[in-house]
Image (cartoon, helix red, strand yellow):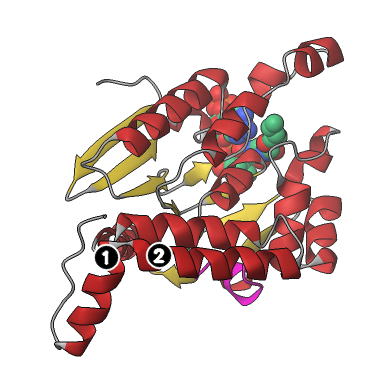
Amino acid sequence: MAYETLIVEIEDEIALIRLNRPEALNALNAKLMSELTAVLAAADANDKVRCIILTGSDKAFAAGADIKEMAERSFVDVFGGDFFAPEAEALLRVRKPMIAAVAGYALGGGCELAMICDFIIAADTAKFGQPEINLGVVAGLGGTQRLTRFVGKSKSMDMHLTGRNMDAAEAERCGLVSRVVPAKDLISEARKSAAKIAGKSALTVMAVKEAVNRSYETTLREGLLFERRLFHALFATEDQKEGMAAFLEKRTAQFRDR
Ligand code: HXC
């Protein structure tokens, strides 16, 4: 299917979704957000997809929500229409793993979109920032909450209050991204990670995603109990038997998602 704002390729059980509004550095407008949520829901439902990579261009992952589209909106428009809330909720419903492969600018909603993904691989050209303060607003797609949990209060405040960008090295140091790779290798490295994930049991992958995400939403005690019960529950799967048998027989496990 052809999209106006995205390029989508499904190959080797990996869906590569590329944001594609080069004229606006992939700014997130209503069309892009609606196409993105539809594509992600379709990828989540597609048996041929086991991992999703979300990326942009060399110059920008996404330079934020579309300022041209937002500039003249009123409080009634954005509050009444719950601006980007259904889209944000839809992104959180995706159960398959999503890797953000970020080169260039990931600012405002772009940084927030990357943080909604399960982990971020950054090109050495990546620049992250929450510059909403320069526009007279605050972040609206989770920036004040997620960035603070990921990098701590001091750096999050610094980023949100000054509106400065951080480079890839700083993003790796503070734990915003899982690793930094040369820009030319960004997609191949993301594909390598996605291929590794695609080789696991889809049940276990979903369990990992649920358990790690739980750590942001509950107390340590509840999170530990949730994790322990998931661990116990996976003993009901054939993939647990296969994974452990394969280890003991010194062979590669053949998971069947059962
Ligand atoms: C609309 C944008 C845009 C944006 C860039 N463009 N960012 N259009 N919305 N967020 C457009 C420019 O207007 C320009 O189009 C073209 O993309 C190229 O951008 P330039 O500014 O000419 O490029 P450059 O000089 O290289 O500067 C790159 C940049 C700058 C530093 C990334 O574009 C920038 O500061 N962009 C805005 C970043 C930002 O404030 N993001 C937060 C948005 S608020 P024309 O037609 O003029 O050539 C947000 C809130 C999310 O994200 C909450 C949602 C609920």
Helix, strand, or loop for circle 2?
A: helix
Where 65 sits versus 98, above or below? above
Q: Position of residue 235 (x, y in %)?
A: 38, 68
Distance CA(mark 1)–CA(mark 2): 8 Å
Q: Quick one: quadrant of the N terminus? A: top left
The one nearer the camera, 231 or 118, is 231
Which residue is pictured at 47% across the width and 62% down the height? 208
The one nearer the camera, 231 or 66, is 231
The region drawn magenta spans: 171-178
Q: Which is nearer the N-term, disc 1 or disc 2?
A: 2
Residue 88 placement, left or right of 13: right
Which residue is pictured at 76% across the width and 51% down the height? 145
Residue at mark 2: 234
Q: Position of residue 198 (x, y in %)?
A: 27, 58
Amino acid type at mark 2 = Leu
| Image mark for residue 239 | 1
